[in-house]
Image (cartoon, rainbow, N blue to C red):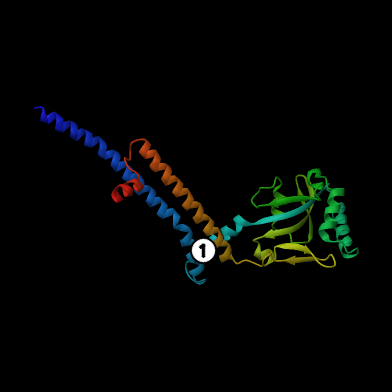
Amino acid sequence: EEVIPQIQNNNSQRAGEMPRRTDGIAMRSCHRMLSSTLGIWPFVLLAASFLVDETSAWTNPIARIKNDFLALTRKSTTRHILLPRSSEAALKLKQSIRNRVSEDGEYVEDAFAAAARRYSLDKETAERGGLLGTLAPQGYCICPELDEVCFRAPLGDVYGPVESDFGLHLVLVCERTNCPKLDGRNTRMVRGPNNECLLMPPEGGPRTMSQEMAELGVQNIGFWLGTFLAAGVVSELAAKAAGVVETLPWEETIDLLE
């Protein structure tokens, strides 16, 4: 009679221990499955972009991925001049800037910046020669019309006027990335030897889509590896601290070696 309760107590203790051990194994298995699943997707994306033929049935999904990549990495460095709602005054100032470039030999960015400091109603940017800074598309600018024209106006050309709720805008796009249909391989304007405006590819030469996607893929791989490694260590330590896992994997290895 004394032996039966002892066996029952031992069984109940084992029954209490096994779920903890099983839970620990389940946690590690789930973590490994998620790591292997999410960690491999950059390789799949890159392999597809390199290997799929343009005439293949898979072209459309890959093209969409590339277009999404371009959309996410587009940037524009732009200057603007905000003017009252007078098309005549805006066109007159636009022609004046162009005359200073063509007749006086002034660099277009210098002429535009000088006009912005003198005439722009946007006092914050006027102090910087109308410089808005580096913008990304999709409404990050407070003025949607200005946001849109930054990715539509020709590179290096005085453009406008463009009407918005604030007034009329003259725009000069000085640099823009990942807009090949609009700019070709050029991404920036530079000063020529005689102050002319030259359109140039990025420093270091133009980069292909595959190169940029490969760089992005490597960055993502590094991010996910670091994330899952940190998450795995933290989860194992937390499980051991809670009594869910009695021994960490590397401790089991050490015990076997000893």
The residue indicated by pointer 1 is 62
| Nearer to us in this view, 90 or 112 | 112
In the shown orientation, is residue 203 left or right of residue 12?
Answer: right
| Image point (80%, 45%), residue name | 122
Q: Secondary structure at mark 1?
A: helix
| Nearer to us in this view, 161 or 229 | 229
| Image point (10%, 27%), residue name | 2
**Above or below: residue 245 compared with residue 5:** below
**Above or below: residue 165 compared with residue 176:** above
Give coordinates of residue 89: x percent, y percent: 87, 52
Q: Quadrant of residue 247?
A: top left
**Above or below: residue 203 compared with residue 136:** below
Give coordinates of residue 14: x percent, y percent: 22, 37
Task: Report the quarter where the N terminus lies.
Answer: top left
Assess disc 1: are there few (<14), some (14-19) or many (≥20) residues with their C-alpha within 10 Å of its C-alpha: some
Give coordinates of residue 109: x percent, y percent: 81, 58
User: For the residue marked with disc 1, what is the amino acid?
Assistant: Ile
Give coordinates of residue 80: x percent, y percent: 78, 52
Q: Quadrant of residue 214?
A: bottom right
| Nearer to us in this view, 232 or 57 | 232
Q: Residue furthest left?
A: 1
In the shown orientation, is residue 3 left or right of residue 113?
Answer: left
| Image point (48%, 48%), residue name | 227
**Above or below: residue 101 compared with residue 122:** below
